[in-house]
Amino acid sequence: TNKPSGGAPLSNDALEAHWMPFSSNREFKASPRMVRKSEGMYLWNQNGDKLIDGSSGLFNVAAGHGRREIADAVHAQMLENDYTSPFQLGQSKSFEFADRLAQLLPDPFNHVFFVNSGSESIDTALKMVMAYHRARGQGQRLRFVSRERAYHGVNIGGVSLAGMVRNRETFPVVMPNIVMMRHTWDEAHLFERGQPEHGAELADDLLRMVQTYGGSTIGAVFVEPVAGSTGTLVPPKGYLERLRKICDDNGILLVFDEVITGFGRLGAPFASQKFGVQPDIMTMAKALTNGAIPMGAVAATDHVYETITGAAPENAIEFFHGYTYSGHPAACAAGIATLDIYEREGLFEKAAELSDYFLDAIWSLKDLPIVRDIRGIGLMAGVEVFPLEGKPGARGNELQKSLFWNGCHVKWTGDSAIVAPSFVAERGHVDEIVDALRRTLKDQ
Ligand code: PLP
């Protein structure tokens, strides 16, 4: 009864016309996997078959698909004021949304800069770091520290910081002076749930950078509190605390990329609250608007904001940066409606409550011979399978497709499935996702 209406199949010309992002275009177009409709925890494919969404889209649809409140808010906003230049001009929605975010963010984060994606939030954060040090007369701090297996989006700043080889090898012209800490995945500690007991000392890689290059040359350290796109690498206990301490000792800013971890995914509003470590700058996107309208944001502490703005002459533009669509009214309306839903339905608390059940269910896949490791925290887990010999990622690609035809969408990166349901999920939905994974993985 709930099947989407048919609709004509796409012509070959139409299929060819769209050069798809991060996709094997030729393979896909030979055998497309299309979604016609989405609602709540479910998607419907081109045949009208129902699939459960095990990754809440791309970890962004945290309140479930098809939220009418968001659609209505966007519609009303578009009719009232569809666009206002954000440069030297204002419209109330961006101020209102920034204020709502500031209330949700950890205490000293009272300033929000709007962008249109996670990738833009990273470039913006890089510029904030440069502007901050320059304002303090330390413009020489042009070295940035990132980490192996990091993913910070696809703009040049993000690719420069990326630790995933395929994001870099095609695009070797990146920012200079980026140095990498080791990642925190440890083959000796497979199937460890939550924060690994061992590995805090890996943060001392930062100390080695300080000792090698001089702390006064380093502007910032960028980390995803939980590395998402490389299959959920949860930080070892004490690791983030140690990074914070080394940053403090050396005047280095700590940037948390909370594009995935922000807005309840870990069972707290942000990872910084979950782990009790406060960065200086936070990037976010994904669940900011429940995926309904593209948007990202960068939050700065009072200190960072006041340092940058305070250094400029009275009438000057203090931060020479911004996008035509920074704080777009429709995106802000979507964001405010999204925060209303999170609050009204207690979705962050709901995610926290479901976490144990979810992680138990995911860990039940441990007995499958194909499964190499499982990691997870909150409502997010990585299920890694053994790669096909000499072909890393090929098995993950095949499994993503089989899973789709077995009634479940899960995002795979390389050979890791990243399972991250919406917070409206009930236990039965978790069972459905895990059953589909079991059926698909056991055939291998
Ligand atoms: N940073 C992190 C941690 C991400 O996971 C992503 C996307 O997955 C990005 C940045 C880039 O976001 P976007 O794809 O919106 O540009």
Image: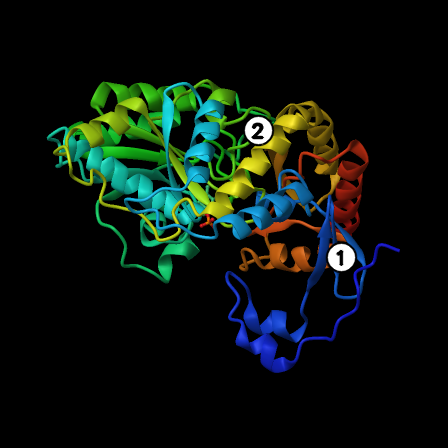
Query: Left or right of 85: which side holds 212?
Result: left
Distance Cα–Cα, label 1 vs label 2: 28 Å
16 versus 313 height, above or below: below
166 or 352, which lies in front?
352
The residue at the point 16 percent across, 39 percent down is: 316
- Helix, strand or loop at label 1? It is strand
| Quadrant housing residue 356 | top right
265 or 328, which lies in front?
328
Closer to us: mark 1 or mark 2?
1
Residue that extends furthest to the right in the rendered view of this protein: 1
Image quadrant containing the N terminus? bottom right
Location of residue 169 in the rendering, given as x and y in whole percent from the top left corner: 36, 59
Location of residue 163 in the rendering, given as x and y in whole percent from the top left corner: 39, 46
| Quadrant housing residue 344 | top right
Three-letter amino acid code at the position of disc 1: Trp
Q: Which residue is mark 2?
A: 266
47 or 110, which lies in front?
110
Name the mark on residue 369: none
Location of residue 274 in the rendering, given as x and y in whole percent from the top left corner: 52, 22
The residue at the point 43 percent across, 38 percent down is: 92
Mark 2 Cα-neighbour bin, 10 Å: few <14, some 14–19, many ≥20: many
The residue at the point 36 percent across, 55 percent down is: 168
Three-letter amino acid code at the position of disc 2: Leu
Specify whether residue 220 is in view.
yes
- Helix, strand or loop at label 2? It is loop
250 versus 32 height, above or below: above
The residue at the point 57 percent across, 29 percent down is: 266
Asked if disc 2 is less than 8 Å from ligand 1, the answer is: no
Query: Left or right of 180: which side holds 78?
Result: right
Query: Left or right of 33: which side holds 135?
Result: left
Q: How many marks?
A: 2
Name the mark on residue 44: 1
